[in-house]
Image: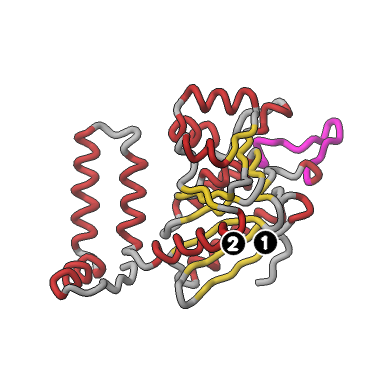
């Protein structure tokens, strides 16, 4: 379907999909229209059989969070932010976390507010050297949303998470990398190529195993050791009956590159 606020590209040779937030004049800030189009785009990516997804922004920024111009500030009729989050932001974050493929955020320029946490909802973040991450919510009297209060302490620890959230200070890409917030920093001109190469590499891997690995690592934050051992057993049993496991073993025996199919 045609989109107004995003672009969707699917490379059938690599099976890598790219969704580009496409409101560059507004730093790709969110509107209700964009949310609706993103939901349709994620359906399209899944239905097309993509095996990896790159999420990025057009122009000089990744995403500046919510577009305040899309909200109603009329006294007595102000937009209920809880309703907005329930209807749009929370479903988007949950959907990204549950996609049956690895998701890479290619962060170009500013990622602020919900835009910063959109990036953190992806599995891996590749950032341009000029990129920055800003938990801007406090600057307008709000709390980090879109998973920010969940992702930040898990990635950088409580002290740094509190510092970022309470000050709203800008975090450079290189410091974000040193803090473990992002996977890789690259020169601006190389961002798209780096993200696409990583996505293509992951798309060749056994997708079910990647998704199961993601599930297990997330569960480890709250599981006991016994529960985690049981989860590993159950996932290994399931994957041991998969096509890709059989293919991987056969390729090892035959001393050739495996041809994984994600099943």
Left or right: 195, with 67 as reference point: left
Task: Give percent across and percent down for residue 193.
Answer: 53, 63
Q: Quadrant of the N terminus?
A: bottom right
Picture residue at 63% right of the left edge, 60% below the top: 20
Left or right: 168, with 13 as reference point: right
Task: Give percent across and percent down for residue 81.
Answer: 69, 36
Mark 1 crowd level (few <14, some 14–19, many ≥20, 10 Å Cα)? many
Q: Nearer the viewer, residue 153 or 94?
A: 153
Mark 2 crowd level (few <14, some 14–19, many ≥20, 10 Å Cα)? many
Picture residue at 60% right of the left edge, 34% below the top: 171
Q: Secondary structure at mark 1?
A: strand
The residue that disc 2 covers is 19
Left or right: 67, with 155 as reference point: right
Q: Secondary structure at mark 2?
A: strand
Task: Give percent across and percent down for residue 170.
Answer: 64, 33
**Image-quadrant location for residue 229:** top left
The residue that disc 1 covers is 6
Picture residue at 30% right of the left edge, 70% below the top: 260
Q: Nearer the viewer, residue 167 or 6?
A: 167
Picture residue at 83% right of the left edge, 31% below the top: 76
> How much space separates mark 1 and mark 2, taking CA atoms?
7 Å
Q: Which residues are magenta?
A: 70-84
> Quick check: marks 1 and 2 in contact, CB under 8 Å?
yes
Magenta highlight on residue 167: no
**Secondary structure mainly formed by the magenta segment:** loop
Where 80 sits versus 100, above or below?
above
């Amino acid at each position: 379907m045609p989109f107004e606020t995003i672009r969707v590209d699917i490379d059938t040779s690599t099976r890598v999909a790219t969704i580009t937030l496409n409101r560059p004049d507004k730093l790709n800030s969110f509107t209700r229209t964009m949310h609706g189009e993103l939901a349709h785009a994620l359906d399209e990516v899944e239905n097309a059989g993509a095996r990896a997804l790159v999420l990025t922004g057009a122009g000089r920024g990744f995403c500046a969070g919510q577009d305040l111009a899309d909200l109603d500030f009329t006294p007595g009729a102000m937009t209920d932010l809880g309703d907005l989050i329930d209807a749009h932001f929370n479903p988007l974050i949950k959907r990204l976390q549950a996609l049956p493929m690895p998701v890479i955020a290619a962060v170009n320029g500013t990622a602020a507010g919900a835009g910063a946490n959109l990036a953190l909802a992806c599995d891996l973040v590749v950032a341009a050297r000029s990129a920055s991450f800003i938990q801007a919510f406090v600057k307008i009297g709000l709390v980090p949303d879109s998973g920010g209060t969940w992702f930040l302490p898990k990635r950088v620890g409580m002290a740094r998470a509190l510092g970022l959230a309470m000050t709203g200070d800008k975090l450079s890409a290189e410091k974000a990398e040193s803090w473990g917030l992002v996977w890789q920093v690259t020169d601006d001109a190389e961002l798209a190529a780096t993200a696409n190469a990583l996505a293509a590499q992951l798309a060749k891997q056994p997708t079910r195993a990647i998704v199961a690995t993601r599930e297990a690592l997330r569960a480890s934050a709250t599981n006991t050791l016994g529960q985690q051992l049981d989860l590993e057993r159950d996932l290994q049993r399931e994957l041991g009956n998969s096509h890709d496991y059989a293919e991987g073993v056969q390729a090892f025996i035959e001393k050739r590159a495996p041809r994984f199919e994600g099943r």
